[in-house]
Image: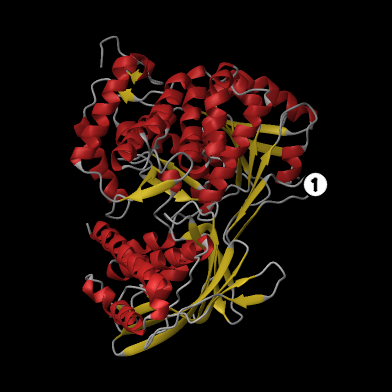
Amino acid sequence: SSMSSIKITSLLRDLIKITLKYIFWTVGESCSTMRLLFSVVCLVLPSTLGFNAFSPVINHRSLIRKSDGGNFKPLQVGTVEPETIELKQNPHPLEEGVLKAFDRFASATQLALEDKRHIDELVTCFSYASRGRMLPDGGVVMGQGAVKRFLTDLLVTDHPNGSRRAEFSAPTIESDSIVTSDDVAVVKSSLQLRSAGETRHLDLELCISSGGAEGASGFEITSVAVAGADVGATSLRADARKNGPKWETHDGRVRQQIWQHTGLFDSGNRFIVDKLEISTGRIIAVIDANVWKLHGETLRTWADSLDLKLDTVIAPGNEDHKTMDNCLFMLDELKRLDPLRRSEPVLAIGGGVLTDVAGFACALWRRGVPWARVPTTLLGMVDASVGIKVAVNYHRKNGVGHFFSPTHTFVDAYFLGTLERADVISGCGEIMKAALVHDRTLFDLMDEHGVRLVDKNFENDEVADEIIKRSVDTMLECIGVDLWEEALLRPMDFGHSFSRTLETDSTFYLRHGEAVAIDACMSTLIAEVKGYVTRAEADRVLDVYYRLGLPCMIKGVTADTFKRAARDIVIHRDGLLRAPLPRGIGSCVYEDVFTDGEIEAAFARLEGFMLKHPETCWDRSKSFSPVDTEDN
């Protein structure tokens, strides 16, 4: 693939440059002929290796590092003619990482201009909460989604005369252009775009920080400033005020406050009423039928204690009721109850399916009435509590839907005590997904405490509260800055490359977390085949899934099922696979190709694991849906 060839060529180039630098450092200081030879080779090196004009040209005359005293001091450099090349005898890891991060930025820019779908590869050079800014005094955008719009407008938006901005000169690092302090570097660069005879010269200012989850160098861009682009504003913040929300998302279009609060429906508790600003004496609630059966009396007592009229819509909440018919039923009920347009927000109480369908009904009714949600399942608390997507299954999984944010989400562990064990385990599937690609500490917590917490339904336990909090933190960091999913390379898509096909197959009737778990196991083994995780790491992952009771495979499924699923998801992801895979435990990498051989090798490895642990093989008898007596 083009990506593979670029990576291989880049490695060859780096190897040759390192060799030349070593020769120059050892004998070049005393040999003018060697200095001249090195200069000529450096000038022709990109073309001799098949590089084109997109290769970054490092031209900085002085690389300076901030000293502990706050003053700047020049580094030792070697000067060669006719170009000025930075040669530092003792490269600092920060400066080395900065140059690698810039090289990655330049290569990704090339891909984005060749095919605008690859703008997402460029976006992954930036941190989750990265910023874009117009110079000198323009507005600021924040978050990968907003930065994607910023860069799309800058690089690949169709030109007014119909031609695309398809040519550009390589981004270059200019003289006196890198200043480093602690673990952050500010890099000033330039870029030229040419189309239809017009040339645009852009000055870029990149802030590059160490410790990023993306990029082999461990560095990522935290901000980019460019002269010109006209974009909006977006923000994400955690509100640390006393009695404030635990989390808050705000992107300029919607605002949602997320609260972790215990005992919401205790008698006399006004928390929800006050946050929703209920002033009419009535609260309209769409409630999962099973939740109503288990907790209806508690809800009625709570409403009576506050002198509230509780008008209810009782609806089914299983995956096989995530349908247009169920949504139409809710719309009929909203017509009957006729909520005031702004003063009576609808409160959805139930699992992820119920809140998805209820949110979609609220989005449709009168072009949108405000709503809030109380997730009552572990999966709903850790997965659906941040996002703003609402949908029903129609012809395909989530085939008809919308982005429609609730004003508030209330997370209350009280409801976990009555969950069925299978639903608790399903929620663990989403927790493990987040842990594997974003939070190693969360993975360690599940490894050490997960089995015990499953046994007690994650209820009344400090570690359980910490796991729920870290899971929401992960979702917030990964999707809170891109609620509208404008960036297509998303860590939280891990576990969703194969699961869509498995989950929509009526032969299986999998819970969402079960499908994600099977996908995550298979994807982890593909990552092992590709060399992103070690065998020991893959074995540890499978062992945790086994001990938690999560399924790792489905009875009767073959490698061909996963090959078909990989082809199907490409359509959903705009023609590219864009599959997140674990890189070690706690970070991720993206792949556009799963070869048949890789899928077969991973599947064979998983079959071997199932022979040792047959209980990890899922069958229809474990389904949430009624089961026929004959074996499916």
For the point 44% across and 61% down, the residue is: 125
Q: Is residue 60 left or right of residue 538?
A: right
* Numbered-mark total: 1
* Three-letter code for the amino acid on which mark 1 is drawn: Lys
Instruction: Give the quadrant of the N terminus.
Output: bottom left
Q: Toward the viewer: 255 or 607? A: 607
Residue 532, located in which quarter of the rendered image?
A: top left
**Residue 395 in the image, given as x and y percentages of width and height:** 30, 40
Q: Residues within 10 Å of mark 1 (few under 14, many from 20)?
A: few
* Furthest-front residue in this view: 30
Q: Which residue is mark 1?
A: 242
In the rendered image, the vertical position of residue 20 relative to residue 304, given as above or below: below
For the point 39% across and 27% down, the residue is: 539
For the point 36% across and 50% down, the residue is: 590
**Residue 516 in the image, given as x and y percentages of width and height:** 40, 33
Q: Toward the viewer: 144 or 87? A: 87
Q: Is residue 419 visible?
A: yes
Q: Element at badge 1?
A: loop
**Residue 185 in the image, given as x and y percentages of width and height:** 56, 68
**Residue 68 in the image, given as x and y percentages of width and height:** 69, 66
Q: How is the image coloured?
A: secondary structure
Residue 347, located in which quarter of the rendered image?
A: top right
Q: Toward the viewer: 545 or 253? A: 545
Q: Is residue 377 visible?
A: no
In the rendered image, the vertical position of residue 416 relative to residue 598, given as above or below: above
Instruction: Give the quadrant of the C terminus.
Output: top left
In the rendered image, the vertical position of residue 518 relative to residue 76, given as above or below: above
* Furthest-top residue in this view: 629
Q: Toward the viewer: 36 or 116? A: 36
